[in-house]
Amino acid sequence: MKIGKTLVSAEEIDAKLAELGAQISQDYEGKDLLLVGILKGAFVVMADLARHITIPVEFDFMAVSSYGSSTKSSGVVRILKDLDNEIADRHVLIVEDIVDTGLTLHYLLKNLRVRKPASLKLAALLVKDGIERPPLDVHYEGFHIPPEFVVGYGLDYDGKYRNLPYVAVVDSVE
Ligand code: 5GP
């Protein structure tokens, strides 16, 4: 596997997360906010975004199945780890790394809505353009990228490259 062109640099990510963090701090001022990161990919975004949020927040995580070692979405969503906290009457912000087919988030939003949070919104660092997906309101979005398979900043190829501080395309797979 070869890492290709950088689509979003570390500096661009940091500037965008600062902007989103300021907006979130303003929007949730005086409210009790629970950030819900979707593992594994979102742990990097979650850590960096949260440090740009100036109001007190709590963290929780969910783990869902997504890609295995292939680069195509299976469309099958399985909860591997559920939330530790109850979310009834709480303000919940889901933090996701990337919206591709949107199937994972579509399912998660449906699943979490049933638990009657006070509000349920969505933050995603990356949104792939040119993909047909169910209607999905991403309230805080970072960057639109072309519909290519990317790695870095939490996103993996076969479990690796999550530690790259930038987002890059995968050039060749062998
Ligand atoms: P979706 O359900 O929107 O198709 O995508 C769900 C998950 O698939 C994402 O949270 C992410 O973990 C993974 N995914 C989607 N697109 C990419 C990609 O381009 N690269 C990597 N490494 N993972 C992706």
Image (tube, rainbow, N blue to C red):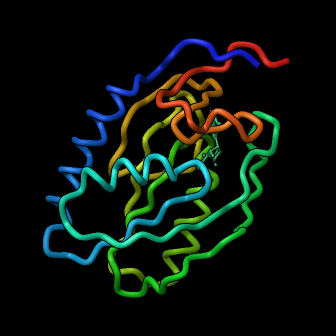
- Side of 19 where 7 appears, left or right: right
Q: Is residue 74 above or below residue 26?
A: above
Which image quarter is the C terminus in? Answer: top right
Q: Residue at x 54, y 81 (%)?
A: 84
Ligand 1 - quadrant of the structure image: top right
Which image quarter is the N terminus in? Answer: top right
Q: Is residue 146 above or below residue 121?
A: above
Q: Is residue 5 above or below residue 134?
A: above
Quarter holding residue 77: bottom right
Residue 149's spot in the image, x, y percent? 65, 27
- Side of 32 where 88 appears, left or right: right
Q: Residue at x 31, y 35 (%)?
A: 14
Q: Viewer-proximal residue, 168 or 111?
A: 168
Residue 157's spot in the image, x, y percent? 72, 33
Q: Residue furthest right?
A: 174
Q: Viewer-proximal residue, 76 or 66?
A: 66
Q: Residue furthest front?
A: 163
Residue 146's spot in the image, x, y percent? 53, 22
Q: Residue at x 38, y 64 (%)?
A: 93
Quarter holding residue 2: top right
- Side of 172 where 161 appears, left or right: left
- Side of 157 where 117 appears, left or right: left
Residue 147's spot in the image, x, y percent? 59, 26
Total label count? 0
Q: Residue at x 18, y 59 (%)?
A: 54
